[in-house]
């Protein structure tokens, strides 16, 4: 070899990293990542849907109705599922820091939207909310939170409240608000909502 020639080291190309794991540890990591990605995907599409509705409604409500109909008609997301995803999207900031603990099911996350951010974080800390939490466990968790809230309300000795139906025609928005309020009142322990022909009576703990 001539003096001015330099030795050249030939390096074989690196072996490509296989997409398919070859041991338990690799498979566990791959499956765990996919499982977590499912929850992230649900939150992401929920937020996109929520943001789209807000943005389009700001311009023209018909634009959002058009998008919603197209998603339904083209079998992307049904209108019923859209309603649940919109609720999730509206609570995105409650969920974003506990994504890793969410069950990867939109129905489960929809149910969890009843909880506040502190309640979600506490449930994670107490290991009551994990990706393996089942629907019945979520229902029990939500009921326990409702019970605690109801006890606080009950301890305040709610006075009698009388809601009387007037002869004025109610708007659809007012009717919807009354229905929502009635459902919430019926969930409170120690309170009895009695509907009558004259209106509705809300009976509290200190009712004679």
Image (cartoon, grey):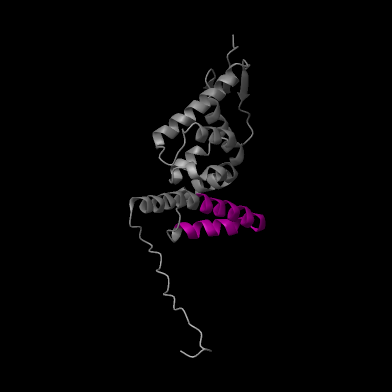
Over which residues does the magenta segment extend? 43-72
Q: Is residue 3 visible?
A: yes
* Residue 48 falls inside the magenta stretch: yes
* Residue 35 falls inside the magenta stretch: no
State how many labels appear: 0
Q: Which of 187/10 is in front?
A: 10
Q: Which of 199/31 is in front?
A: 31
Q: Quadrant of residue 19?
A: bottom left
**Residue, x 54% and y 32% (percent of image)?**
122
* Residue 112 horizontal/vertical position (percent): 50, 38
Work out whether 129 lies above or below 197. below
Work out whether 181 lies above or below 191. below
Lateral position of residue 117 relative to residue 23, left or right: right
Q: Which of 5/166 is in front?
A: 5
Q: Quadrant of residue 200?
A: top right
**Residue, x 55% and y 53% (percent of image)?**
49
């Amino acid at each position: 070899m001539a003096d001015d020639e330099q030795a050249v080291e030939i390096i074989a190309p690196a072996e490509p990293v296989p997409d398919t794991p070859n041991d338990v540890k690799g498979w566990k990591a791959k499956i765990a990542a996919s499982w977590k990605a499912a929850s992230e995907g649900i939150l992401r599409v929920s937020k996109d849907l929520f943001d789209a509705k807000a943005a389009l409604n700001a311009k023209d409500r018909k634009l959002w109705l058009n998008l919603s109909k197209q998603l339904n008609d083209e079998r992307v997301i049904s209108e019923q599922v859209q309603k649940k995803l919109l609720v999730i999207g509206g609570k995105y900031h409650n969920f974003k820091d506990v994504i890793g603990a969410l069950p990867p099911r939109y129905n489960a996350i929809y149910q969890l939207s009843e909880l506040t951010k502190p309640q979600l974080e506490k449930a994670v800390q107490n290991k009551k909310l994990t990706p393996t939490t089942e629907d019945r466990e979520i229902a029990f968790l939500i009921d326990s939170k409702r019970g605690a809230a109801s006890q606080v309300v009950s301890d305040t000795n709610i006075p009698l409240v009388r809601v009387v139906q007037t002869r004025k025609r109610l708007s659809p928005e007012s009717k919807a608000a009354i229905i929502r309020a009635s459902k919430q009142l019926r969930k409170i322990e120690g309170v009895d909502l009695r509907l009558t022909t004259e209106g509705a009576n809300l009976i509290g703990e200190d009712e004679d």
